[in-house]
Image (cartoon, rainbow, N blue to C red):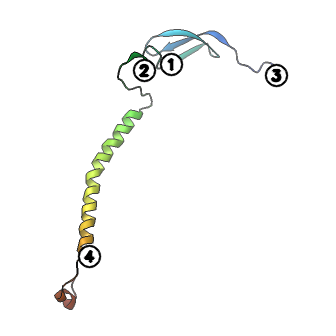
C-alpha cells in the first residue's frame, strides 16, 4: 500500500450552522460551515418552511405564473384556428363559384 496518500483526520472538527448551533464530528477538515443542521431543519423541528438555498422554489413559482399568463394566449390562438378551419370547411355557394369570389 502507498504511504502518505490519506488526508489528515480531525477527530474533533467543529461544525457551525447558520442558525448558530455548533457541534463536533470527525472530518478531514478542521471546521465546517453548514446552512442547515438538525436544530433548524424542518423535518426535525416540525415547522412548515421552505429550505431553498438555490432559489428553486422561486424559479418554479415564476414558471407557474408564466404558464398561467400563456393559457389565455394559447386559448385565443386555438379559438382563432378553429374559426379559420370552420370557415375553410364551409362550401361556397353557387353564386360565389360563378363570380369567382371566396
Counting from the top left corner in percent of width and height, residue 96 is at 19, 86
- From mark 1 to mark 3, how far is it between C-alphas? 33 Å
Q: Secondary structure at mark 4?
A: helix
Q: Which mark is residue 34?
A: 1
Q: Which badge, 4 or 3, comes first in the chain's sequence?
A: 3
**Image check: 35 left or right of 94?**
right
Q: Secondary structure at mark 2?
A: helix
Disc 1/disc 4 C-alpha distance (Å): 66 Å
Quadrant assignment for the C terminus? bottom left
Q: Circle 2: is it few (<14), some (14-19), or many (20+) Cα within 10 Å? A: few
Q: Where's residue 74, x and y in %?
A: 29, 56
Q: Is residue 68 above or below residue 4?
A: below
Q: Nearer the viewer, mark 4 or mark 3?
A: 4
In the picture of the structure, the residue carrying the numbered disc 2 is: 43
- Which dot marks residue 47? none
Is 65 situated above or below 35? below
User: How many angstroms separate mark 1 from mark 2 (CA)?
Assistant: 16 Å
- 1 or 4: tag closer to the N-terminus: 1
Mark 4 highlights which residue? 89
Q: Which residue is drawn at the image coordinates 45% and 31% (left, top)?
A: 54
Mark pair 2, 4: CA separation: 60 Å
Q: Which residue is mark 3?
A: 2
Q: Nearer the viewer, residue 30 or 78?
A: 78
Can you tell which of label 1 and label 2 is closer to the viewer?
2
Q: Is residue 18 shown left or right of residue 61?
A: right
Looking at the rendered structure, the number of numbered marks drawn on it comes to 4
Looking at the image, the residue that sits furthest to the bottom is 98
Q: Looking at the image, is mark 2 or mark 4 earlier in the sequence? A: 2
C-alpha gap between disc 4 and disc 3: 82 Å
Q: Are marks 4 and 3 in contact (CB under 8 Å)?
A: no
Sequence-earlier tag: 1 or 3: 3
Amino acid at each position: 500500500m502507498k504511504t502518505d496518500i490519506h488526508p489528515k483526520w480531525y477527530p474533533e472538527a467543529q461544525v457551525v450552522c447558520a442558525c448558530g448551533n455548533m457541534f463536533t464530528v470527525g472530518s478531514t477538515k478542521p471546521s465546517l460551515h453548514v446552512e442547515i443542521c438538525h436544530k433548524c431543519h424542518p423535518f426535525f423541528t416540525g415547522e412548515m418552511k421552505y429550505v431553498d438555498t438555490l432559489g428553486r422554489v422561486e424559479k418554479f413559482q415564476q414558471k407557474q405564473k408564466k404558464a398561467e399568463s400563456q393559457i389565455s394566449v394559447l386559448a385565443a390562438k386555438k379559438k382563432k384556428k378553429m374559426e379559420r378551419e370552420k370557415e375553410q370547411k364551409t362550401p361556397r355557394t353557387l353564386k360565389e363559384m360563378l363570380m369567382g369570389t371566396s
